[in-house]
Image (spheres, rainbow, N blue to C red):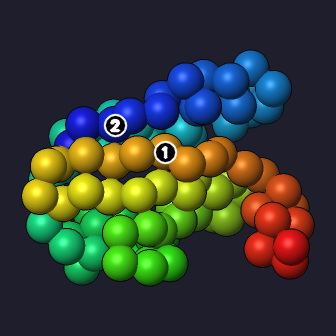
Amino acid sequence: MKIFGKEKIIKFNKKHPEASRHLNSWVRKVELSTWNNPHDIKNNFNNSYDQLGDSKGVFNVKHNNYRIVVQVRYCNGMVLIDGVYTHSEYDKLRLK
């Protein structure tokens, strides 16, 4: 899959260097993947992905310490990063 918005991960890694290894691992794994549907993602990420809508979802990284919100364009092989958050930041967003 081709990832767009990697600069959001780079920015997050600067603010949270302890996340860097885990988020960079996520990037490598996504780039080596080919997904046709949400089931493919769940199989590839051992159920650490939750579907939020038709093309939107959230990855739980490092045992839910970090969240990556994405849009997936299966037909184009694209993953668009909407945001990268700590667990608590993500929870605050959901409450709004």
Q: Quadrant of the N terminus?
A: top left
Q: For the point 13% across and 67% down, which residue is it?
A: 36
Q: Nearer the viewer, residue 81 or 48?
A: 81
Q: Residue beneath label 2, please?
A: 3
N-terminal label among 2 and 1: 2
Q: Residue at x 18, y 60 (%)?
A: 74
Q: Is residue 51 visible?
A: yes
Please indicate, yes or no, whether residue 62 appears anywhere in the rendered image: no
Given the image, on which type of amino acid does mark 2 rest?
Answer: Ile
- The total of numbered circles placed on residues is 2
- Relative to 36, does residue 20 appear above or below in the rendering? above
Determine contact: label 2, label 1, CB under 8 Å: yes
Is 14 placed left or right of 21 in the picture?
right
Q: In the rendered image, which residue does mark 1 sit on?
A: 81
Q: Nearer the viewer, residue 85 or 96?
A: 96
Quadrant of the frame with the C terminus: bottom right
Q: Secondary structure at mark 1?
A: strand
